[in-house]
Amino acid sequence: MRRSRTISVAVVVAVSALTLSALPAQAALLLPPTVADAYSVMLSTTQAKFVGQGKQTVSNFGVANSSKGTPDAPWLCDLSGDNEVKGKGAEYIISSEVLNLAGKNVTTIGQEIHLYANEKKAKKTYDGIVEAIKSCEGQQTPAADDTDDSPLNITTTLNNGAKKAKDGDPFLWVNSVTEVGDPITNFVDHDYVTVRLLGRYIQILDVESEGNNASAIAKKQIAAADRLQDSLGDAWQEKFS
């Protein structure tokens, strides 16, 4: 199945344990923010445990940059056919992802910070997302991946909305459940995505559970993800406001 929400490893500087000397000069000169400062307030393995990630995990931290356009636009949902709902991407993306290795299915939580040239561009992008995200609704039939040998019946059920954290900070959310009509595998992909505007930045937090008969994202995991969307965003604003 096609998924473009995850930045390709080919364009990301992936770091398991942050070693600034190993980063390219272009990434190290990312101002603002600096790579080290960004790393200090991004999603950690400890925070990921609040959303249900186990003791055995793999984490990635990266910076992606495109000389023209964006390395990846903010992904919101898949619609019928090859249609996707995305926001306008930024030149730089900083990301942190924690992958849970325990259990038979794949569960991940990822944070992306999209860095726009100024607050006006970020706000314009966010306003576009506010409208576009309304399309993430109802039942959709996304196209199968081009590598699939035989046609598959794929159904995605979507809903979306807006929330406010306890401190009043607003954010958007999309809940997505994709099921592959294969009685042998019973493959299911659950996604819970939240979006928040942070001045000249847009933060995306994505919790995913996928695999054969993969468990749905529980209400307590969603609540924990909402709290992380708020606390991580607050930490970023405090560091880079």
Image (cartoon, grey):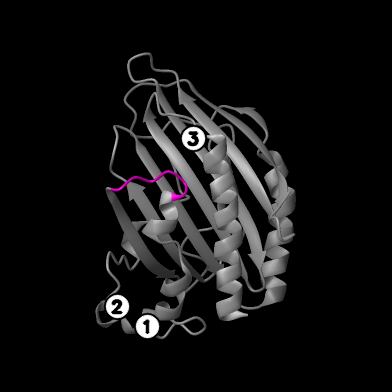
Sequence-first disc among 2 and 1: 2
Q: Label 1, on which residue?
A: 28
- Secondary structure beneath label 3: strand
Query: Which residue is pictured at 48% across the width and 67% down the height?
Result: 93
Q: CA distance from mark 2 to mark 1?
A: 6 Å
Q: Label 2, on which residue?
A: 23
Image quarter for residue 117? bottom right
Up/down of 19 relative to 17, above or below: below
Tell me, yes or no, if residue 74 can be seen here: no
Query: Which residue is pictured at 54% across the width and 48% down the height?
Result: 224
- Secondary structure beneath label 1: helix
Q: Please, what is the three-letter code of the amino acid marked with disc 3?
A: His
Which stretch did the figure color magenta? Answer: 50-55
Mark 2 crowd level (few <14, some 14–19, many ≥20, 10 Å Cα): some
The mark found on residue 72 in the picture is none
Q: CA distance from mark 2 to mark 3?
A: 33 Å
Query: Which residue is pictured at 64% across the width and 46% down the height?
Result: 173
Relative image position of residue 222 (x, y in whole percent): 56, 42
Residue, far top: 183
Up/down of 8 relative to 82, above or below: below
Q: Quadrant of the C terminus?
A: bottom right
Relative image position of residue 49 (x, y in whole percent): 41, 50
Relative image position of residue 14 (x, y in whole percent): 31, 65
Q: Label 3, on which residue?
A: 190
Q: Please, what is the three-letter code of the amino acid marked with disc 2?
A: Leu
